[in-house]
Image (cartoon, rainbow, N blue to C red):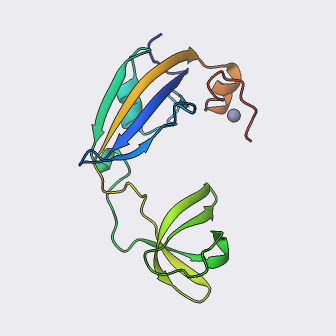
Amino acid sequence: MNIEAGQVVVMDYKVLDETGEVLEESNPAEPMVYLHGHRNILPALEAALGGKAEGELVSVTLPPEQAYGPRQEGAVDRVPIKHLVKPPKKIQSGSLVRVNTKEGARDAVVVKVGRFNVDLDSNHPYAGKTLTFDLQIQTVRAATAEELAHGHSHGIQGSASHHG
Ligand SMILES: [Zn+2]
C-alpha cells in the first residue's frame, strides 16, 4: 500500500541535528503511528511521506522554518513553581525542569528564578535547528471509521483503548 490521506502509517524514526548527532530515536517496541493527511505530524514530513510504500526509508532534511521554527531570543513563559512536575529542591538558571501545560507535560530550561515563579525558555527544544528525519516505513493500513472521525490514529492495529 502506498501512503495517501486516510491511511495509518507505522514507522521507526530517528531525528538528527546538523552534526549528525541523534537527538531522538523511536524504540523498536514503540514505533511512531500517525494518520496521514490530518496534520498529525510536521506538514513537510507528511509531504515527503505521501506516495511512499511499506519498507521504504525516507530521509528528509528540514530547515528550522519547516521544522520547529527559528529560536526567539528572550522568549520566556513565567510559570508558578507549583506547576512544575516534581520541582527540584534547588532550582537555578539553566536547570532543566518539567512543566505541566494544557497540552501535557514538557521539558523546559529555567532562565530566571523568583520566589514563587520561574521564567522558562519558551522555545521548542529543537527551535533553530536544521533537522534530518530518517523514517523507516513499517506498515500502511486503511484507517478505521473511528480514527477518521477523530482525526488521529488509535495505535498500530487501530484498536488501542481510547485516550479521550
Ligand atoms: Zn481518538
Residue depicted at 57% across the width and 31% down the height: 29
Picture quadrant of ligand 1: top right
Image quarter in which the C terminus is found: top right
The outermost residue toward the bottom is 115
- Looking at the image, residue 110 lies above or below residue 124: below
Position of residue 21 measured from the top left corner of the image (x, y, whole percent): 30, 47
Left/right placement of residue 91 relative to residue 86 reads left
Total labels drawn: 0
What residue is at 31 percent from the left and 58 percent from the top? 70
Does residue 127 appear to the left or right of 20 in the view shown? Answer: right
The one nearer the camera, 21 or 15, is: 21
Q: Residue furthest top?
A: 1
Q: Is residue 125 above or below residue 23?
A: below
Asked whether 7 or 158 is in front, the reply is: 158
Query: Percent position (x, y) of residue 33?
Result: 55, 30
Q: Which of 126 and 97 is in front in this view?
A: 97
Instruction: State the residue in front, 6 or 22.
Output: 22
Residue visible at 45% across and 73% down?
A: 76
* Residue 75 place in picture, x, y as percent: 41, 71
Q: Please determine whether, in this image, residue 164 is positioned above or below residue 139.
A: below
* Residue beneath the point at 62% across and 29% down: 153
> Where is 52 relative to 123, above or below?
above
